[in-house]
Image (cartoon, rainbow, N blue to C red):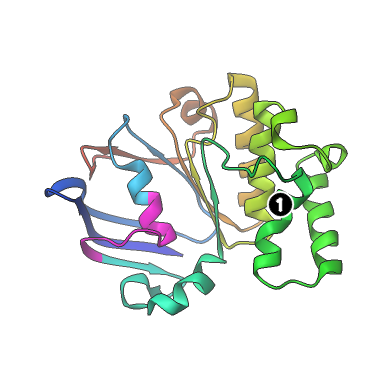
Amino acid sequence: MIQMFHVSKSYEGGVPALVDVTLKIPKGDFLFITGPSGAGKSTLLKIMFGSEAPTEGQIILDGRNYVRIPSAELPELRRRIGFVFQDFKLLPNKTVFENVALSLKVMGVAPSDVKRRVARMLSYVKLQHRANFKPLQLSGGEQQRVAIARALVKDPAIILADEPTGNLDPALSIQIIELFREVSSRGTTVVVATHDKMLIEKYARRTVALEGGRLIG
């Protein structure tokens, strides 16, 4: 599903964020990426998503080489990927329903299908009773579940999550990872960047570690 070959990323001034990363993630896998702040976890996910290009190396998703795809075709490929952020990135002036529906509307999905799919997804994350609330009326855990629903509603093949439990207490963190585990059990590839050792030890999933932009395990 995801293959990276000798991927490196340097920013302005030659500062390396990733160094010679080679990684294979099979379809339906659940992978933790761990490492300290600044290790390169977020950069790695952004390259997987296609929002940043590697300085060197190749990345293949669903058999297509990201580096060689024309920029006009990238949005179509990104529709197969859901991204979940640590700080939720919900639109505060939109309701829960509207936040989750946004990506479907951008894709041109018919209004009747939007309503059905959003209702199904809010039920899945147990937030159907919050559909007309604004994000700031929700708890942190509820906001993160809205963000997950927004990522899942387009039925992605891949879910990328960047420190999705970083702002949550341990009990809520477990709820969020349980959601991802269920999603993975249905065949979606899930990649979670986290420095939370408790979660990594509890779930004993495949884990790779970054340090200074390099894979060390």
Q: What's under tag 1, amino acid-wise?
A: Val
- Residue plotted at (80% across, 39% down): 127
Crowding at dot 1, Cα within 10 Å, few <14 / some 14-19 / many 20+, comes out as many
Q: Is residue 162 above or below residue 197?
A: below
Residue matched to label 1: 100
Magenta-drawn stretch contains 105: no
Q: Which secondary structure, mark 1?
A: helix
Q: Nearer the viewer, residue 20 or 131?
A: 131
Residue 185 seen: no
- Residue plotted at (65% across, 70% down): 107
Residue 22 seen: yes
Quarter of the image where the C terminus is located = top left
Q: Nearer the viewer, residue 45 or 205?
A: 45
Q: How many marks?
A: 1
**Left of 116 or right of it: where is 152?**
left
Q: At which x and y percent is residue 209?
A: 32, 38
Q: Nearer the viewer, residue 135 or 76?
A: 135
Magenta-drawn stretch contains 51: yes
Q: At which x and y percent is residue 144?
A: 63, 36
Q: Which residues are magenta?
A: 45-57
**Left of 133 or right of it: where is 1?**
left
Q: At which x and y percent is residue 121?
A: 77, 51
Q: Is residue 34 above or below residue 124?
A: above
Q: At which x and y percent is residue 216?
A: 24, 39
Q: Nearer the viewer, residue 121 or 137?
A: 137
- Residue plotted at (58% across, 24% down): 168
